[in-house]
Image (cartoon, helix red, strand yellow):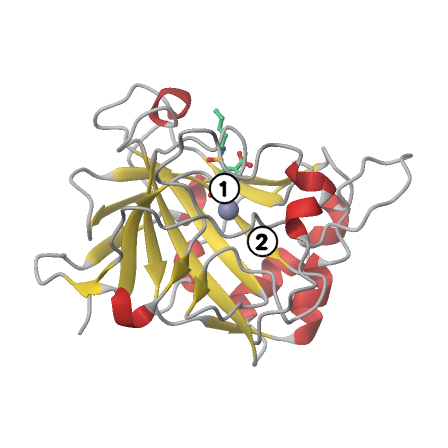
Amino acid sequence: CSRKNTRNASLHPLWQSPLTIPGGTRQSPINIQWRDSVYDPFLKPLKISYDPTTCLHIWNNGYSFLVEFDDSTDRSIIVGGPLENQYRLKQFHFHWGAINDWGSEHTVDSKFYPAELHLVHWNAVEYPNFEEAVMEGNGLAVIGVFLKLGARHEGLQTLVDALPAVRHKDTVIEFDVFDPSCLIPSCPDYWTYAGSLTTPPLTESVTWIIKKKPIEVDEDQLEAFRTLLFTSDGEEERRMVDNFRPLQPLMNRTVRSSFH
Ligand SMILES: CCCCCNS(=O)(=O)c1cc(S(N)(=O)=O)ccc1C(=O)O
Ligand SMILES: [Zn+2]
């Protein structure tokens, strides 16, 4: 995908909040320049163990659609990789574009993918709840997975089939069994860097783990994302597209890779 200068997400109504928080030194998303990333032989493989029955519901929160999980126990966790502790799965969501030329939040060598999946986890070893973890430098760990146009993704289809039920902001549907590991590439390679939430409160509390390999989804599945609405039932409809934050300055950060 080539970078389009018509990508005016920074002017998008979604981003009333400041593009970069004043004094922010580790904001997300960023461009990952492959040749500038540094192989770290001490990075461990990321261990992912999700219990599909911890899945609760899908809801449209007016930014994206989120699949939320029961994070009251350690049944769905990640450990290893760059992480000192184990982190509990809270939710996953996506960012996507109006067209296939852009949509991801992170870029690789300035290339955009049409969409990006984020699996949000929090450090339940050191913090009592998610809200507190959101405010701490090592509070969150988000796995990022790029989506590229290709073959239909059967695991994603069960999610896509539920989207009409959450078309409007603040609608929710029960979704009681789903294993999100089917959305994560089997290739173990990832980049990792210290960053932030890409939506308010934009806190600098995220250890980002960005998978090198994308997953493939087909055009119909991307189009299904674009049928969602930012707006509530009864409001003038605004299609939920381009729900990504513009790229932020790398500043004094190094992106590490788990691979040569
Ligand atoms: C207590 C305030 C939490 C705000 C952030 N919530 S979150 O689940 O971490 C999240 C992360 C992200 S992101 N892109 O992973 O930073 C996007 C949306 C949300 C959300 O709340 O919808
Ligand atoms: Zn996100």
Residue at 39% from the left image edge and 27% from the top image edge: 134
Q: Position of residue 51 (x, y in %)?
A: 36, 47
Give the residue type that dot 1 points to.
Answer: Thr
Mark 1 CB within 8 Å of ligand 1: yes
Residue 207 drawn above or below residue 223: above
Q: Secondary structure at mark 2?
A: strand
Residue at 19% from the left image edge and 70% from the top image edge: 259
In the displayed structure image, the side of residue 4 where residue 228 appears, left or right: right
* Front-most of residues 23 and 146: 23
Q: Position of residue 11 (x, y in %)?
A: 70, 46
Residue at 30% from the left image edge and 31% from the top image edge: 139
**Residue linked to disc 1:** 198
Rendered image quadrant of residue 158: bottom right
Asked whether the residues under the numbered discs 2 and 1 touch, taking CB atoms below 8 Å apart as contact, a structural biologist would say yes
Mark 2 CB within 8 Å of ligand 2: yes
Which disc number belongs to residue 95?
A: 2
